[in-house]
Image (cartoon, helix red, strand yellow):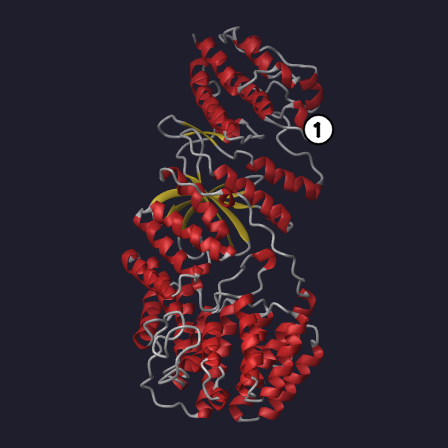
Amino acid sequence: MVGEEVESGNTKQAESDISTLQSVFPRNPDVHTAAAEYFNEMQNFARAADAATTAIQLAPDSPDAYKARALARSSMEDRKGAIEDIRKAMAADPQDESARILSALIESRRETSSLKSLASLQDIKRSFEGGSPSAIGGTASSGVAGLELKPSAAAQVPPQESAKASAYLKTAASKTRLGDYEAAARYATLALDKNPASDEAYLERANAYNFLGKYDDAVRDTTSVLQRDPGNVQALNMRAWALNRKGLFREAEGDANKAINLNPGYADSWFNRALAYEKMGDYKRMLEDFRQAASLNTAYASRFRDAVAQYSGRVQDFDPGEDAIQPERAAEPRPRRNKTGRFAMTLGFTLSGGLLIAFGMLHIVSGRRERPDGRDTQPDILSPSIFYEGVTSGKYKIERKLGEGGMGVVYEAVDQSLERPVAIKRMNDEIKLNDNEKQRFLQEARTVALLHHPNIVEIYTIFEEDDNIYLVFEFIDGPTLDKKLEKDVMLGTASVVEIFDQVCKALAYAHSKNVVHRDLKLGNIMLNSEGDVKVMDFGLAHSAKETLARASREVVGSPAYMAPEQAYGVSGKDSDIYSLGVCVYEALTGTLPFPGPNFQEQKEKMLYHPVSSVMAGIPKAFDPLLEKAMNPDPDKRFRTVEEFREALLAVRG
């Protein structure tokens, strides 16, 4: 294995193994980039430059490949080429701290010979100790973007121990990418045993601790780094995340403030401060910081829109801008990595005795900095704050399963940060059939989440986690109207009018925002313990069913409640009025006006019994009201929900 060969000093065999990898996977830029990084570490700079050049030819926007070649070129006294490469790396990823540091080092005109021992970000930082002015502003003591790079008090680590520490650290990084955070913490600890002064190892372990929920340990490790390097933005952000999770929001805000002052272009810092403001109830500054994070890194755009949906109603005069309610603009399509090849590569490494893990390349091959359609799918190795707070990360505690339906499974849960009950719906897998379907559904959900009305079940937020989509709703401590009808058999005309007065208010508000329900039925109307009516699933159930229909070619919607035009794919506000009439009919009588199975014929020919003839005691005034609402011709129905409501209240007298 490469790791063992490095530790034993058998570098020739290790280089032979890496050459084999390059020949087996000649079109995989990640393999060539990893090879370049390895050859730099072994100070074989010519081979490092060749491997990095191949990677750049395959992936011209790879910052890692440019950095690897920059280090190799600089070590071979090609300073001009190195500067050109590092600038390209910074253009590809403006937030890459290591690129900025390497740029400062190369442009500082430090003796090239001093670069030949550099193999890591930590080595690069240490190269500033006692050194020259930086070409990008500041001095050696202030470092890059405000990083304070102070001389290390630690003794020099013997080369053999340093090589072992580097191998352990690479394995820790690969374990993080695999999601094995316990192992990542163990390997980072082994790296620290070999090199106690390795800030990278402390940060790697702190990152694992954050994922594991061991926030005290994460604070300890990041504090250790900050004692030596008070301007380490990564450490400040990691500690801010841990402090937020510990409930120490003021302290988290303080770390985020320091990180922003050091580097205002680093999105994670704004995100961390936004989280602190959220917990402290400062929603205006929270939204402003989320917006800034999203402007710096599109990975945060969804989180900003979710925050706007949840909190904008509480912030007077907050203007989210058009981007807050629009989906992310599609990035230029990138060539998709060959998943079959990636699996074959992993399998080959496994059969050959774990070479991939030992080499520490898995975190590269499995998608390091890979952002399909401009979106991050995993947190950066040293940046845990990018992952969304959700079920597995501890924000929500699941209490019990409430039910399961066509859209997904619903759970009662507790939002532990706000100490309030919520309902969480995990969407069915059909939503994830392809990315277009998923993004279409998420955009509709975010639009609905902007609805804030006392008679509408509020969507607090939407998030993706572990390849699942979750909707977090206001928890309603009561039954749906169909369940209440099953229990009570009859509701009485006064109760029906009172209930649907509130339903009409909800629909009228949604229509004023150009949101159509499209699947109104008794099962989507809830009653809380205080008797308030809450309408849920505006547009969402229909959207989910459309996705399922495209997969199964089934009819979309709830046929008994749908307006006849919906069978032809046409729906609008007048379709909701039709469904409203069906719901009132069923609530009054306990039966559906059009029981099927030939729903369409019954609706188009209006083959139903007037409501007053079905149940004794129902005023005849309901008959013309429902006849107009359930007219098969949309132009002959009530023009608006408000008009329907006025007619309904007139029946009550």
Vertical placement of residue 528 versus 605, above or below:
below
Is 482 placed above or below 12 here? above
Q: Please give the name of the residue rendered at 33% of the width and 60% of the height, measured from the top-left corner.
A: 257
- Please provide percent x and percent y for residue 583: 54, 22
Name the amino acid type tagged 1.
Tyr
Left or right placement of residue 46 versus residue 420 in this view? right
Residue visible at 60% across and 71% down in the picture: 365
The quadrant of the rendering that contains the C terminus is: top left
Q: Is residue 652 above or below residue 187?
A: above
Residue 107 image point, x, y percent: 48, 79
**Residue 261 in the image: x percent, y percent?**
35, 63
Q: Secondary structure at mark 1?
A: helix
The foreground one among 7 and 198 is 198
Label 1 neighbourhood size at 10 Å, few (<14), some (14-19), many (20+)? few
- Residue where numbered disc 1 is placed: 568
| Extreme residue in the top direction | 620
On screen, residue 453 versus residue 589, left or right, reads left
User: In the image shown, does 373 or 464 lie closer to the viewer?
Assistant: 373
Q: Residue sitting at 65 percent across and 42 percent down?
A: 548
Left/right placement of residue 241 relative to residue 637 reads: left
Q: Position of residue 580 (x, y in %)?
A: 54, 21
